[in-house]
Each structure stands twice: as structure tokens, then as C-alpha cells.
């Protein structure tokens, strides 16, 4: 749903042109991590294969794409958000990309160079005479894009959401009429049955975690400060029909050590807990359940079955996302990161929590048919690694699990293929959970091009049924969504 009244947008008429050449040869700017330099529109994109009948809507992917040469050490987490859209309508398939015009980026545009040091330079602060009202931290809005309450929001977990339009123009930061003070996760949970949105924000300072519920019309109507023993990096949460569920894993912001080592440190000695509370519960209704330490960046779905809560996620036994200003750049970028699918269960009556591995395959970027979030889900989609020469986020396979039969099927993109996140586009004529398609922007390092691949969600191993040839490569990015055509 798009807002009925078109909101004013920022700088829509002035295209931006990038300046990054990477003279310092920073690893996170090499190869397909290099940003694209401009904003373009293209229509009538060539398609190989057969696009599914009835697949009408817009695929939008967010990701880092720095406009200016970074100051000091650069991490992919720092880059200015850029939205790439691929639209399927009665005219065919078209492409557009736009930078998100954050206040920080606009201050840099006014200055003509980068002002903000990134996460790897956390003890350095930008020149306040240059940042103006953009503040000391840039909110690049580079992680995800969702739609709720008539607003499309680009998300970054360190700050407020940024409202954008379906045409990818920037409206500006959205604070829910002043009710959201602090940050918002990039992974809120949307209940397709009630229309509510469940979300949280973490902070390096107390309160470390604040939980919110947003009504279907976009009104933030419930906020609760939750008590955590330490400030942790929490990326996602779980929603059931009745509960909000949090994994308080000990991936801890090491404030005492800032500037002298990793900004976030795995501290299993702190313990690990799953928190469960009613969806609109009070802080004292939150119950904690101890579990073996492990970090989950992304969950699939969660659901309640009597006194049991079940959910799945990709579990890191010891996460390290390289937010570190002391490790040599090459070493950090090449760090082997392994997450594997895991099944979690909380027994509310017995007061216990438990997990078990689901599969040996490494992967992440978990997605489901979004109509099944909060209820028992059968089909789980993941981006996976079938080889071991790849780095964080550089997947090579589209994976599907049937959680009922335990069957895993996958499609490998081959030695030159780099797989992004699979987004589920429901078949409007479908009835089954897996009636739909997976859309995945796959980069080919031999041709230096990106295709948006369309796979049948029922038969991933058959490979793409269609490939939309994009007019340019899409740099490595984060999360995407499918916004079906209305009507
Ligand atoms: Fe994420």
C-alpha cells in the first residue's frame, strides 16, 4: 500500500554521482563490493525464459553503496543505503536505483566529501561544523526495506527508519509522530492476519532494549523497556500469534574497549537467554529461559503450540562480524563465518528452552512466505554456501527446506554465481504455502553482470524459470522485499 498523499521528497530532482575509486584498496570495496556510481532508469529489460503469469509487483533490494571515498577503514555496514527496484507490470520489466538521501549523506554532498568515519573508526567523531543538524552518527538506512501502515521504510538498526516512496525517493526519517525515541531493528515482524508490526530497538546505554507494537494504521501504541544485563547486538526477533520472543545472545558491545579492539565481542560467559512475553505485555511479564550460548542473526518464523513455542534460525556458535578496528583488513574480511540452520523450542510449562541443529549446510538470509509469519511454517528458504571459499554474505546457493519431511533441496549458482537473498513472491492464484516464486539478484563474476532470477518456490532445484538481465551489476547487498501490485 502506498501513501495516499504523496509526501514531499528530498533531492529527487538532483541525481547523485559517486566518487569512490578505492585508492586504499580496501577489501570491502573490491570486486562486487565496489559501489555503482550513479542513478539510472531502464525499461523493457531483456528476459530469458518465461516470467510467471500473474507475477506483478516490485522487487526492492537495499544495500550499502558509499557515495564518497570513505574516511579511514570501511566496512560494508557503513555504506550509504541504495535501493534497487525491479518492477514487473503490464509494460514489462523495468529497473531503477536511487541513493537514500540521509541527512548525513546530504551533509556530505554539501561538503563534497565524506564527513562520517565508519564503525571501524568509532572513536573518531565527525566535524560538527560540517554535519550541521545531521548529528554525530550517519543513519545510512542501508539494511532492509519494508512497508507498513501506508509507509515504505528503509531500515538500519542503529537509528530511526527512513521513509521512502515506491519510486525510491527519500521522504526522511520517521519517528512515528515522536513516539519512537531511539533505534528500530531492520527486522520488525509483520502479522499478516492483524496488520500489526512488532519491533524493538537496542541501545549501547540503558535501557538496552525497548520493544514496540505498531497498529495497522502506523500508530506506535505500545512501548516497553526491557531489562538486559548488558548491551547486545540483537538483529531480529520472533513473533507468534500470542508472543514476542527475543534471543538475548552474548554478542556484547564492549564499551570499555572501544577503539582498542572489536566493538562487539562474543562473551559466552555472560550466558544466553530466550525471552518470551505476551505481544502487548508489560515488562514484568517477560520470562527468561536459559539456553546454550549461540547467536542468531535471522529467524524464519515462530509459532505457539499449546505451552510450546517453536522457531527456526541460522545459528552462529560464535559470531564475529568483523566490527573491529585492530585486525588487519584482509584478515578480517576473510574471516570464516559459519551459521547453520537450527530449531529452537521453549517449553513454557516446564520453564526450559532447547535447540538442535537442523542441517550441516552453512547459510543465512532466511525467508518464508510472509503470509505464514507467526504460525506454523513448513517451507524455509535460505541462501547457502556449498563451497568454502566464500566470505560473509557471499552465498552461492538457493536452499529450500521442507520442515515436515526434513527434505533439503537446493540450486547452486555455479562457480561464478553469487547469490543474494531469496524473496518470496506469492502467486496471487495460489493456495498452498509454497505457491509462489523466489526472486534472487545473482551476480556473475565472469560477466560482471547481475540477473534477477525467478525460481519456482515449489521446485528450487529445477533452477530459474526466468532471468531478468539487469542493466548493471548490483553490488553485494543486504535485504530485499516484494511489494505486490495492488488490485
Ligand atoms: Fe538482517
Image: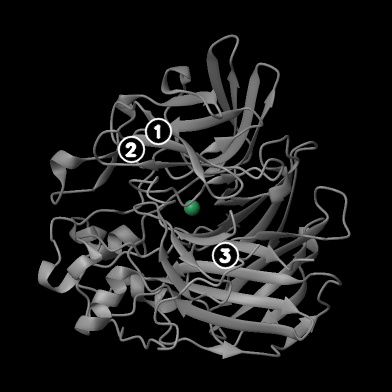
**Cβ atoms at labels 2 and 1 below 8 Å apart:** yes
Q: Is residue 301 above or below residue 484?
A: above
Across and down, in percent, residue 135 comes to: 21, 62
Q: Is residue 369 left or right of residue 171?
A: right
Q: Residue at x 63, y 32 (%)?
A: 240
Q: Tag 3: Cα neighbours inside 10 Å, few (<14), some, or many (≥20)?
A: many
Residue ID at (68%, 54%): 399
* Residue bearing the label numbered 3: 420
Q: CA distance from mark 3 to mark 2?
A: 27 Å
Which circle's residue, 3 or 2, is located before the other in the chain? 2
Residue on which the image places disc 2: 232
Q: Nearer the viewer, residue 260 or 36?
A: 36
Could you tell me if the residues under marks 3 and 1 are in contact, i.e. CB atoms within 8 Å?
Answer: no
State whether residue 72 appears in this view: no
Q: Is residue 87 left or right of residue 28?
A: right
What residue is disc 1 on? 249
Say if 438 sits above or below 355 in the image: below
Amino acid at each position: 500500500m502506498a501513501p495516499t498523499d504523496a509526501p514531499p521528497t528530498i533531492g529527487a530532482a538532483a541525481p547523485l554521482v559517486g566518487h569512490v575509486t578505492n585508492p586504499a584498496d580496501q577489501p570491502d570495496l573490491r570486486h562486487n563490493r565496489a559501489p555503482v556510481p550513479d542513478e539510472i532508469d531502464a525499461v523493457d529489460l531483456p528476459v530469458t525464459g518465461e516470467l510467471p503469469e500473474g507475477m506483478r509487483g516490485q522487487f526492492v533490494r537495499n544495500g550499502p553503496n558509499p557515495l564518497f571515498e570513505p574516511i579511514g577503514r570501511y566496512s560494508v555496514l557503513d555504506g550509504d543505503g541504495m535501493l534497487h527496484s525491479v518492477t514487473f507490470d503490464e509494460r514489462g520489466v523495468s529497473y531503477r536505483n536511487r541513493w537514500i538521501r540521509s541527512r548525513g549523506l546530504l551533509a556530505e554532498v554539501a561538503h563534497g566529501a565524506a564527513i562520517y568515519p565508519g564503525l571501524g573508526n568509532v572513536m573518531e567523531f565527525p566535524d560538527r561544523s560540517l554535519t550541521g543538524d545531521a548529528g554525530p552518527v550517519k543513519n545510512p538506512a542501508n539494511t532492509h526495506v519494508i512497508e507498513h501502515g501506508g509507509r515504505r521504510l528503509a531500515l538500519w538498526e542503529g537509528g530511526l527508519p527512513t521513509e521512502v516512496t515506491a519510486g525510491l525517493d527519500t521522504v526522511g526519517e520517521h519517528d512515528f509522530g515522536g513516539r519512537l525515541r531511539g533505534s528500530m531493528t531492520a527486522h520488525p515482524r509483520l502479522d499478516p492476519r492483524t496488520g500489526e508490526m512488532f519491533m524493538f530497538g537496542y541501545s549501547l546505554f540503558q535501557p538496552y532494549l525497548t520493544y514496540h507494537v505498531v497498529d495497522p494504521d502506523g500508530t506506535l501504541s505500545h512501548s516497553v523497556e526491557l531489562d538486559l544485563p548488558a548491551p547486545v547486538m540483537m538483529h531480529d526477533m520472533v513473533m507468534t500469534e500470542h508472543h514476542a520472543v527475543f534471543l538475548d545472545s552474548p554478542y556484547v558491545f564492549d564499551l570499555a574497549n572501544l577503539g582498542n579492539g572489536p566493538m562487539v565481542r562474543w562473551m559466552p560467559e555472560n550466558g544466553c537467554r530466550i525471552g518470551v512475553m505476551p505481544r502487548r505485555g508489560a515488562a514484568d511479564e517477560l520470562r527468561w529461559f536459559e539456553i546454550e550460548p549461540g547467536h542468531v542473526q535471522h529467524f524464519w518464523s515462530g509459532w505457539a503450540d499449546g505451552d510450546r513455542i517453536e522457531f527456526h534460525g541460522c545459528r552462529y556458535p560464535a559470531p564475529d562480524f568483523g566490527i573491529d578496528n585492530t585486525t588487519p583488513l584482509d584478515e578480517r574480511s576473510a574471516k570464516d563465518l559459519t551459521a547453520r540452520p537450527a530449531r529452537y523450542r521453549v517449553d513454557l510449562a516446564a520453564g526450559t528452552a532447547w535447540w538442535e541443529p537442523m542441517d550441516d549446510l552453512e547459510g543465512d538470509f532466511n525467508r518464508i512466505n510472509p503470509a505464514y509469519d507467526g504460525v506454523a511454517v513448513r517451507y524455509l528458504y535460505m541462501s547457502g554456501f556449498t563451497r568454502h571459499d566464500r566470505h560473509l554474505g557471499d552465498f552461492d546457493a538457493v536452499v529450500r527446506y521442507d520442515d515436515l519431511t526434513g527434505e533439503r533441496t537446493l540450486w547452486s549458482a555455479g562457480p561464478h554465481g553469487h547469490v543474494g537473498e531469496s524473496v518470496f513472491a506469492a502467486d496471487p492464484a495460489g493456495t498452498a504455502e509454497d505457491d509462489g516464486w523466489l526472486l534472487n539478484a545473482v551476480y556473475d563474476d565472469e560477466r560482471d553482470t547481475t540477473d534477477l532470477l525467478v525460481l519456482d518456490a515449489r521446485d528450487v532445484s529445477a533452477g530459474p524459470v526466468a532471468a531478468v538481465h539487469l542493466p548493471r551489476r548490483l553490488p553485494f547487498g543486504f535485504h530485499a522485499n516484494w511489494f505486490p501490485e495492488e488490485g
